[in-house]
Image: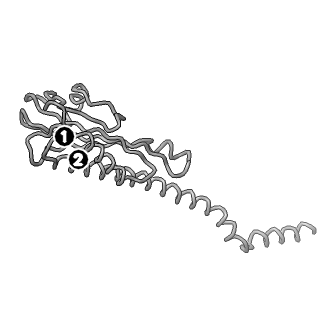
Amino acid sequence: MAAAPLWHGLRRFWRDESGSAILEAMMFIPLLAAAWVGVFVFWDGFSSKAALQRATHAAADMLAREMVPVDTTTLAGLDAGMELVVPGRFNVTSRFTAFRRTGPNDADVAVVWSHSPGALLPAMTDAQLQSRAATLPALTVGSHALIVDTTMNYAAPMNIPLVTYTVPSSFSDWVVLRPYYVAKLCQAGVAC
């Protein structure tokens, strides 16, 4: 006989839905917050990479428009201009290189001059340039072109363990352009 009231009490407890919304919210709000933070961090990484690409393309375009030999001050100014395009918490490292096609094969390329403001990147060598030869545009023999290389170390705005495994810690980009108004762009003080 005592089992019947206990059974009815348990039935009433299982049917009672008061407080269910609070319990469900307590279960799902942390999941929604984690998803929101994850989306924010991935968006930040994507927008930072896009900013680096815009900065690289803008610097390459400005360099390709030069009509007189560039000096180290001009190249440092291009580097400083890129710093204005990317988010303030990142530092952009750049290298500007001029090269020429020396023969009909992909690997027939040679560095004319290479400079990194602040010497943060080593000057590009012929071997490094030839390792990229398959990805360079097909130029006629004797033609000159410019390469702007950039790298940026990336740190997520929040320290989340999963992000360190899925978002790279650095981004890099490079652009190849031919000088617009002159046949070759020289660096002041370097034989061209």
Dot 1 alpha-carbon crowd within 10 angstroms: few under 14, some 14 to 19, many 20 or more: many
The residue labelled by disc 1 is 146
Q: Secondary structure at mark 2?
A: helix
The amino acid beneath tag 1 is Leu
Q: Residue at x 18, y 31 (%)?
A: 190
Res 60 label: 2
52 up-or-down from 126: above or below: below
Q: Position of residue 67 (x, y in %)?
A: 12, 46
Q: Residue at x 25, y 52 (%)?
A: 58
Q: Residue at x 16, y 47 (%)?
A: 66
Look at the numbered discs 2 and 1 and tell me whether their residues touch, using CB distance below 8 Å.
Answer: yes
192 up-or-down from 4: above or below: above
Q: Is residue 167 left or right of residue 50?
A: right
Q: Position of residue 163 (x, y in %)?
A: 50, 47
The amino acid beneath tag 2 is Ala
Q: Quadrant of the N terminus?
A: bottom right
Q: How many marks?
A: 2
Q: Is residue 17 left or right of residue 108?
A: right
